Amino acid sequence: MSGPTTIADSLQPGSRSSWYQLDPLQDPRWAEFVDRHHRASVFHTVAWLQALRGAYGYEPVVFTTAPPGVELKNGIVFCRINSWLTGKRLVALPFSDHCEPLCDSKSDLTQLIHHLQLLLPQQEWKFFEFRPISVNLGQAADGTGCLPVAKYFLHTLDLRPALDDIFRSFDKGSVQRRIRRAESAGLMEKCGRSEELLSAFYALFVITRGRHHLPPSPYAWFRNLIDCQGKALEIRIAYKDETPVAAVLTLQFKDVVYYKYGCSDASFNKWGATPWLFWRAIAAAKSNGASEFDFGRTQQDNAGLLAFKNHWVPEPKHLVYWRYPYSPSLETGEDWKSKLAKSAFSFMPDRVLTIIGKLMYRHIG
């Protein structure tokens, strides 16, 4: 699709309201709108959408009430997933921690949701799903028949205080002491986007996913992220002597830095490399003018990760994914097939899980 198309009149004859869809990779209005909207995140950007399409073949689409050629005042961005394995659906957005519908008006949001509900059977989509942070947007969705499909915690750190005050706000034993231990151990950090760093990161990522009995995302996904995000993406790797022992990948959009991926070699955990890398990323974010550090979503039943993030930000936000019509989520493990797959993964070596990841991820976004 190369431009905006109106489809409201054929769905609702006689309606005075219209709605339109546009290709955010082709229509320059989307990038301009995202750049000026106060709730837009890195997951709304053209660069993120390009990476999703390049790695997984997902086609992005925006639904709005603005006619062609008119400045955008609202928009909900989705990816169309067309899988022979998991079916056709709209998701806002795959592999994204959150992605607000950019609608400042509740009436605009409910109007767009109602139109999507009408479009659903025509396009043979199983469901549409969106992932707002705002509680008000969730309440608006609740009035449309959308239902919660997954619940997470979202930890965000305020970077506006002085750096020393930020450090003192962290848990003394689990964060401050481990950072000092890493500094005493003489860990070295490398930061950038080189092929060498990506290879080291991915090797640790495969080890970590294997430890959790899960297939890793394909290497091509990270390669696409680097190509599309450019300087907004940073890989930080901690080395003990010359051995890479932990890594984090962050993204920046406007004044927010987003932690997206982390991994480590558990045999080196005693050196505190992961907390040290987080601290290095936080300090760099503040130095670069960021006002917030987004630690990303955490599943409610992931007690270990939740405890780790609570030591940095003790009062997380609630993050709810909404879906219409309701169906179980593969990510939350509510589906028996997902549970069975995870059990099978626990017996597979890392090289087999890596192959499965290349084949599987485009179907589960």
Image: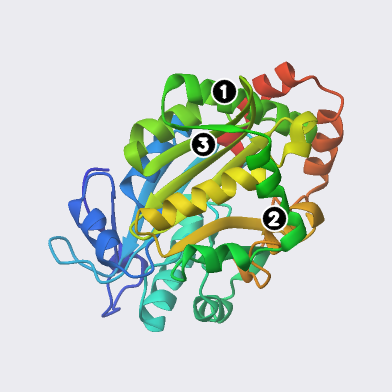
Give the quadrant of residue 215: top right
Q: Nearer the viewer, residue 177 or 220?
A: 177
- Give coordinates of residue 202: x percent, y percent: 58, 26
Q: Is residue 102 left or right of residue 90?
A: left
Q: Residue at x 39, y 70 (%)?
A: 112
Whole-number angstrom distance, CA of label 3 to CA of label 1: 10 Å
Amino acid carrying label 1: it is Ala
Task: Tell me, yes or no, if residue 27 can be seen here.
Answer: yes
Amino acid carrying label 3: it is Arg
- SS of the residue under disc 1: helix
- SS of the residue under disc 2: helix
Q: Mark 1 sits on what residue? A: 200
- The image's mark for residue 175 is 2
Q: Is residue 132 left or right of residue 184?
A: left
Q: Which residue is outermost to the front?
A: 184
Q: Residue at x 29, y 50 (%)?
A: 24
Whole-number angstrom distance, CA of label 2 to CA of label 1: 25 Å
- Give coordinates of residue 289: x percent, y percent: 34, 59
Q: Nearer the viewer, residue 59 or 270?
A: 270
Judge whether 101 appears above or below 280 on screen.
below
First reached walking from the N terminus: tag 3 or tag 1: 1
- The image's mark for residue 236 is 3
| Closer to viewer: mark 3 or mark 2 | 2
Task: Tell me, yes or no, if residue 365 can be seen here.
Answer: no
Label 3–label 1 contact, CB within 8 A: no
Check the picture and name the quadrant holding the C terminus: top right
Amino acid carrying label 2: it is Val
